[in-house]
Image (spheres, rainbow, N blue to C red):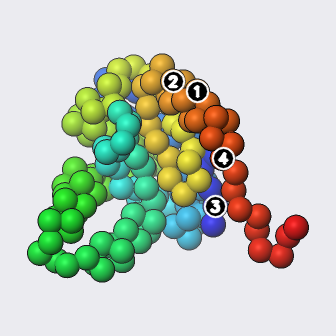
Amino acid sequence: MTHFLGTHQNRLDAKGRVSVPAAFRAALRAASALPAEAEAALVLRPSHKHPCIEAWPAAVFQELATPLDRLDLFSEAHDDLAAALYADAFPVETDREGRIVLPEALARHAGLADRVVFMGLGRIFQIWEPAAADRRRDEARERARAGALTLPAASGRN
């Protein structure tokens, strides 16, 4: 699985278009098993935890259906999670120049103006207002440090 890595800043134009960083476009094509010249599909949605936009490769977003389908179709938990995940989701494709159009509602949710930050999170990436992205990274680092967070060792390693 290819991962979205790093933090990149780009300009948002007056039409709401922004270029997805080249490294993210390559990871997106790899995650979607697409040839280099193909346009890649993404699902954009507002984060329900942070003032940013989440960007999911379409195939990874589709994986959310499996655990959601385990919930009772008529339960409040199912309805709440389905609404949180799907109601404000926007499928988009990159154009030939690697740009996407950010829906106005999502740009407003994230407080975006003329510059945006793309923050890699492994399987997905987020789109932030630059100062908010800086604060988020600082807070995450501090919580990881204060909580002495680590990852379990990979199997077969000591």
Label 2 with label 1: CB-CB less than 8 Å? yes
Local secondary structure at mark 2: helix
Residue 53 image point, x, y percent: 37, 41
Q: In this rendering, would 146 be left or right of 19? A: right
**Label 1 or label 4, whichever comes before in sequence order:** 1
Q: Circle 4 sits on which residue? A: 149
Image: 76 above or below 8: below
Q: Cα distance, mark 2 to mark 1?
A: 5 Å
Which residue appears at 61% of the width and 30% of the height? 142
Q: Position of residue 32 (x, y in %)?
A: 51, 67
**Kind of element beneath mark 4:** loop
148 or 14: nearer the eye?
148
* Mark sitting on residue 135: 2
Q: Nearer the viewer, mark 3 or mark 1?
A: 1
Tell me residue 145's x, y (percent).
Answer: 67, 36
Which structural element holds mark 1? helix
Report the mark closest to the observer, 4 or 2.
4
> Mark 4 and mark 2: span between their CA atoms?
19 Å
Nearest to the observer: residue 141 or residue 131: 141
